[in-house]
Image (cartoon, rainbow, N blue to C red):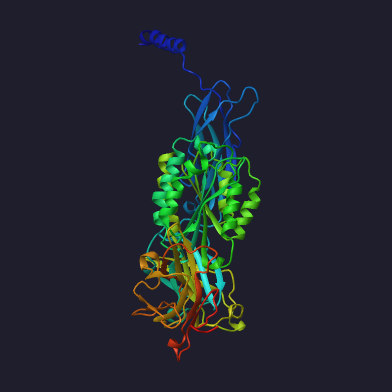
Amino acid sequence: MKRVYLPFLMLTVAAVALCGCPKPKEAIVLSKEFIDFGRDEWPQLMSVWNGNAGIATLTVTITPSASWITVSPKQVTCAAPDASSGLLDKKIISVAVDRTQLRAGQHEGKVTFTSRGIVAKTVTIRVTQDVDGTPRGRINFLDKPVAVYGTPYLLDFNFALVNERGDPIVAEPAQFQLSAREDARDVDQELTGAHLQRTAARQAKVLLVLDYSLSMQRAPDAIVAMEHAARNTLLPALGAGALVGVYEFHRDDRAPQAVIGLTTDKDLVSNAIGAIQSQFVQDFSSGSRMWDAIHLAAKALEGPNANQEDRLIILFSDGNDTSSLRTADEAVAAAVAAKAQVYAVAFGRDIDLSNLYLISTLTGGLVLPTEVAADLEAGFARLVDRLGARYTVRWATARRTNAEKFTPGFTLKLSDDSLAYLGDQVFDPTKYEGDPLRGELRFVASQNTLWTTVFLRAEYTPRQVKRIRMYVRPARNFDVSVVSAADEGIAGSWSVTKTPDTEYGGYWLNIMGPTPLPFATFGPLLRLDFDGVVDDATPLFEQIYVDSSIYEPIGQSFRVAGFPNTPPGGS
């Protein structure tokens, strides 16, 4: 048998040797071979590049060994080293750890970098998990709730909810059961008005910051996909009362520009986005001034009522900045000062995730990377879901003295799953004194090219209010309607009548409903559409008066921010 097969085996080996199998080439170079997250929550960044001058283009696929390791992007293309300058085409890779998949202990995995015919490289990933991070149910906080305390005796907790996979939970507040606590004492919900609302019920101010610089223009289909997703996915998802504006940046020798100021007219915003290429870019783009654009948008959001507004900057960019006069620190500081969160939808051929993670994490926002233009629509849809999964728990404590300081907490229940939170800021009632019988209202205006729209919003409502009677003397005539519950209106079942005052001019608005407004709630009440545009130099109202006599003998009242409560004919 040996004599039969030995010559055949030798011939086979010889044939393989003559034929030859191509030996894998060295080309993939990594900035790190080991990443130890320890107890760090933030993503880690590293670089990969093509180190072989003989390979003009190197496409590298990045694959994690475990589901708790996430990488972005998952594939990069690197050019060969520049022969004359020696410059390397380095691509930034973000590596993150999903601790919700990890139990307590040390964990280790790998990220592998591969390319056909090229020697593969790996990075070892290590993480320390002190406690069991795996979700105990289907409902979890995305991050720790943020406490905001105010008058009269108000406690607000703002947070986002996700399921065990980290996907946003978008549900009607009525689907949740809420239990609030002050120290170990359960809160009487009827007494304190403890309730859950969507954060979207706050006055939203949203500025889109869109990147039209050369690096984005060169990314296939990026601009078209960006505009389509912003116009057809994001804008329709924002509430009727949300104020939206747009900024763009596209060249290094010109400062970023406001495309359209804050307005509730989403069609106007959509048309303005569609005209950016023709009216602003005009086939000329160059370096990026991203930090300048964010700084400019943040400054536009500055102003009073920060705790009563939901301020967002939504950035679409590859994260590169070549020419800003402002630094990254200045852009972050401006956003933090304005209390604005930055959400970044990342796309491009050369994404700088380090910049995008910097601005988003330090402002409480989020980065949503997209790898191909076709994913942009889905990226914006994920952003919409993230925004829709934000909620606010509010109540007005009945405690009044310094001796009654307490640590607040609450529990949410959805179906059979519950989630508890214990605050880390003590509430001292004496620091937030106020009249619980006096409600707070304010008007928020918006303009477009045809008319001016104004929303009447409640920031706090006393208990047992079934009617609001208000006199207004406006700059010109208007139509008025109740904001529907679908648009987060808090008086969706109410009605409004408008009656002229024949003696003093102006109008009486009578707003009433079958049931009282929820105690201590916030949100839009009325929408007023004026005939034509009221220019910025003209006051919208010459006089506003809320009639509190209808609440006698109990004594509830309302005031409208920025207006003395002067009755018709009064001075």
Q: Nearer the viewer, residue 271 or 412?
A: 271
Q: Position of residue 350 (x, y in %)?
A: 54, 37
**Residue 187 appears in the figure:** yes
Residue 450: give x, y in percent of width and height. Answer: 42, 58
Against 504, residue 356 (above or below) is: above
Pinpoint residue 131: horizontal percent, then vertical percent: 53, 57
Q: Where in the figure is residue 382, as x and y percent of width and height?
A: 42, 51
| Residue 39 can be seen, yes or no | no
* Quarter of the rendering occupied by the N terminus: top left
Image point (50%, 65%), residue name = 158
Instruction: Answer with left or right where residue 260 lies relative to residue 29.
Output: left
Query: Which of 545/53 is in front?
Result: 545
Q: Nearer the viewer, residue 163 or 49?
A: 49
Quadrant of image for the C terminus: bottom right
Q: Residue furthest bottom?
A: 553
Disc tally is: 0
